[in-house]
Amino acid sequence: MERDDPDGSRLLTSRDVGDLLSAAVEHSGGQLVDWRMEHVDANPQHSTTATYNATVQWPFGRREELLGVSARVGGPAPSDERAEIFAAGSRQLAVWIYPKDPDLPGLVRAAYPAGMAEVLNEHRVLPSPVRPEQVALEMIAYRPRRRAVLRATVTTPGGPVTFYVKVLRRQLFAEVERRHLMLLEVGVPAPPVAASTSDHLLVLRELSGRPLAKAIFDPHPPTSAERLIGVLDAMPAAVSQLQRRPPWTDSVQHYTVMVQRAMPGEQRRLDWITAEIQSGLAGTAPGDEPTHGDFHEGQVHVDGGRVVGVLDVDTIGPGRRVDDLACMVAHLSTVQRMNTEQAARVRALLAGWVPVFDTRVDPTELRLRAAAVIISLATGPYRSQEPHWERETSFIIDAAEALVRQVR
């Protein structure tokens, strides 16, 4: 079994993993009642991490839990030792119960109102001490063993105050905080830092305005292409001295393999798209412009036509402006589950913005790089185990193919 499944992806996505989950729960003093897979992160031929929604009968009562499991080629890594190690045949796997993620130590505090109140009080984030019952928490995003983001809303006499809490890995924390401060110092509207902790929590104040991800459905354009480009151009030159983050195009083959593993029937089409991207971009320089690195509608806040905030600045660094604009085109080209009216408004935005982007960067490069970003997005429906992930994945691949065909 291990020889045919070196990274554990087959085991972790099959019903066979149930015995492992049951053993892990029993080791912690409970009984596994039921479970289903919630999320899977596969790195073919290297590792797989999956999470499972589980119903557990504990001595104190029945409760829903989130269980995590990691498998690696060659056995557990040093960080896996912070989880429990269980054997499945000759394979050793790391298992944990949320929030005890072995790579996100701060999650244990951030996941509970008492812990979050402790963080806010420790750093005197608000004028008055915060009690746990004042704190409401909502998980915004969780990539097991990578990062988490929670919304913490505190009820105060003056009204609710909202913070966003980034839960980060130790090796990334200092650089992420540095990037926020670097942008804030020159007036780029990144989220202000309210607190940073020794267990790698970055507490950020809420941005003003509305998320562009919602505003794209407004009857009138929420902002202009020129203003989107303008906020990128406002980033300081020092961003170009940061560590380079490879653009999405550098990993297009990697993501192609991931999608093909989930949907073998798309292999021929994906191979063609990838070959066109790679040949069309061969020889292009990496670039040294200050870039955001993951610029899309979910990262931007707008108000009155202006760009008033930019989120997730963890990825800023040197690159090519075309990569940022291509990322925006890719995400807008693959918005899921829209009604007819919403789809028409997004198409109208693309029709208005892309010609402006074309005046700033090479149009062919823009489309090929956008197609590469789309291939990375095609891993999302399977990874998140969406109910109709096969159909949604094919829709995303359609968008990549359409962009490539525009430049042939």
Image (cartoon, helix red, strand yellow):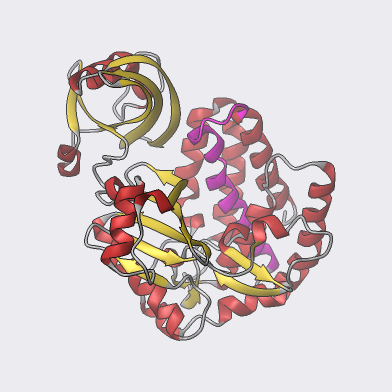
Q: Residue at x 65, y 47 (%)?
A: 400
- Farthest residue, direction front: 157
**What is the chief secondary structure element of the magenta stretch?**
helix
Can you say whether 190 is above or below 187 in the image? above
Residue 279 seen in the current view: yes
Residue 2 seen in the current view: no
46 or 127: which is nearer to us? 127
Q: Does the stretch in magenta take in 180?
A: no
Q: In front: 194, or 335?
A: 194
**Screen quadrant of the N terminus:** top left
Residue 356 % position (x, y): 75, 73
How far across and how far down the image is residue 306, in percent?
69, 76
The image quadrant of residue 330 is: bottom right
Q: How many marks?
A: 0
Locate residue 390, reporting x and y percent. Answer: 61, 28
Query: Residues in magenta?
Result: 363-388
Residue pictured at 39% horizontal, 23% vertical: 54
Q: Is residue 19 above or below residue 243?
A: above
User: As rendered, which of 356 and 187 lies closer to the eye?
Assistant: 187
Query: In the visual, does 220 lie left or right of 152?
Result: right
Q: Nearer the viewer, residue 285 or 35?
A: 35
- Hey, which quadrant is residue 192 in on the image? bottom left
Residue 366, position as x, y percentages in the image? 65, 63
State whether residue 267 is above or below residue 221.
above
Left or right placement of residue 206 versus residue 364 in this view: left
Q: Residue at x 47, y 37 (%)?
A: 257
The residue under the point 20% across, 24% down is: 28
